[in-house]
Amino acid sequence: MSAERPQPISIVGAGLAGSLLALLLARRRFAITVYDRRSDPRTALTRAGRSINLALAARGIRALERAHVMQRIRPLLIAMRGRMLHDRLGERELQPYGRTEQEVIYSVDRTALNCALLDELTRHPQVDFNFEQTCLGADLDADALSFRDLPSGLTYEKPLTPTIATDGAGSAVRMSLAAAHTISAREEPLDHDYKELTIPAQDGRHALDPGALHIWPRGGFMLIALPNIGGSFTATLFLPRTGAASFGALATPAHVREFCAREFPDAVALMPDLVHEFIHHPLGQLGTVHSAPWHIGGRVLLLGDAAHAIFPFHGQGMNAAFEDCLVFDDLLDEHEDRELLFDDFERRRRPNAEAIAQMSLENYEEMRATVLDPTFKRHQELALELEGRFPDRFIRRYSMVMFHPEIPYAEALRRGAVQADIIEAIDRDPERAAALIHERLPPIG
C-alpha cells in the first residue's frame, strides 16, 4: 500500500485511535479525510458519559513515540506507581505495580490527549478534518459512506473505498455492516454500570496521593480515583445494575448519601458535590465488542474499539487501540495490496484482542475483590520475588501487559496461566521454584 503518490483514505472517528492512525498515515504522505460526529474537541467540551482520564502504559507510549508526539504528551501525564487500597476504616495500603521506579503507568486526560494529537495533525496539509458529521453507515453495494451534516441536517455520500473505522464501541460502520449481514457483531454487556464523580483539589493540591491509582475494593463493587493535572481526581463508581448494593437501589439522595458514607467514608469526606454529581451525571454502561471479520476485502477495516472494545479494568482499551495503529503502520512496509494488508492486520491482532478482553474482565474481579484476599497478597509478594530471581523467565502477567510491549497480549495470557500454576505449587513447596521455572518457562526472547 505504497504512498509514493498520495492515496486517499477515509478515517471515520477522530478520537484517540483515529487521530493517532491519521498521524502515522500522514507521516507516510497519504491523503486523509477524517470524519467525526463531535464538534472539534479543541473548541468544545464533549465529555458527557465518557471517562475523563485514562491510564497510559508502555504499549500506548511506544505507539506515540512512533508518531513522534511524546514530547508534546509528557506534560499531560501523572505517574502512578501502584494501587492505593482504602478499607472502610480509612486505612491505606500501597501495592506497587512493579519492582522498579520505571514501572509506572500514567493518568492522562482523554480530551487533552486527543487535542494534542489533533494539533499535531494540523501540521500535515494533506489531512482534511470534517467535524459534526455523523456517519450513518457503509453501503457496500453503492461503495459509499453516508453522513449527516449536523449543522444543516443534510445527508450526503462519500466514496467508501478505502475506509478505516475508528468510531469506537458504538461504531456506526460496524453496525451497518452487521445490519447488512456482511459481518457478525455482538456486544457482551457487563451487569455492572459506572458513574463518574469528582474529588476536587484542596487549595490547588491533590487531596490524596497523586502518585497512585486509588481503589476502594468492596467485593461486589468498587470506587476508583485517578489524579488530574489540576489537583482534582476523577472518581468512578462501579456497581451492579440491580440488587441490594446497586445503582437500582440508590433511588434517592438519602440512599446515595448513606451508602457512600458507609462504604467509602474517607472518600466521601473529600467529595462535597457527591450527591449532586450522582444524580446529574449520566450512568455509563460497560461491554465487550466481538466482531468478525474486521475487514471487507481492501475496502473497509474496523480498528480499535470499533473492532474489539473491551472492559476498562486493565487500563488497556486505549493502549490496545494505539498498538493496533502501530501494527498497522508496521504492516504498511510489508504489503502493497490493501486486502492482504487488512487481512494480515486482523490475523495478527485478533488473538491479542481476545486475550486482553479476557484479562480485562479478570482484572475487575481482582481490583474489586481479590486484592482483599490474604492469599492473593502472599502470591503477589512471591511473584515479585520470582521476578527478581528469574528476570529472563518469570515476569508477572500484569507487568507483561503494562510494561513489556514486546510481549503480545496472547503470550502474556498464556505465560500468566503457567506462572499461576507454578506459584500455587511453590506456595506448597518453595524448594521447587528453580526447577519448575526452568522446566515450564523458557526464556523470553
Image (cartoon, rainbow, N blue to C red):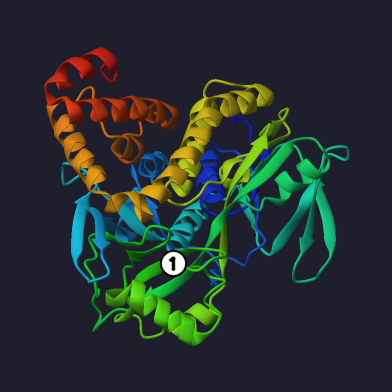
Specify whether 400 is left or right of 354.
Answer: left
Query: Which quarter of the figure has residue 161?
Result: top right
Residue 138 on image: x %, y %: 79, 45
Image height check: is 407 above or below 377? above
In the rendered image, the residue lying farthest to the right is 141
Front residue of this view, candidates 314 and 93: 93
Determine the residue positioned at 25% across, 80% down: 204
Front residue of this view, candidates 182 and 113: 182
Residue 163 on image: x %, y %: 69, 40
Please give the count of numbered marks on the rendered protein.
1
Q: Quadrant of the N terminus?
A: top right
Specify whether 10 is left or right of 50.
Answer: right
Determine the residue positioned at 39% across, 69% down: 235
Q: Is residue 231 visible?
A: no
In the rendered image, the residue lying farthest to the top is 439
Residue 109 on image: x %, y %: 41, 63
Query: Which SS class for mark 1?
Result: strand
Query: Which quarter of the figure has residue 383?
Result: top left
Residue 159 on image: x %, y %: 79, 43
Front residue of this view, candidates 12 and 359: 359
Tag 1: amino acid = Leu
Q: Quadrant of the C terminus?
A: top left
Determine the residue positioned at 71% across, 44% down: 174
Q: Is residue 288 visible?
A: yes
The residue carrying pointer 1 sits among few (fewer than 14), some (14 to 19) or many (20 or more) residues within 10 Å by Cα, namely: many
Label 1: which residue?
Answer: 237
Image height check: is 122 above or below 195? above
Determine the residue positioned at 12% across, 27% down: 389
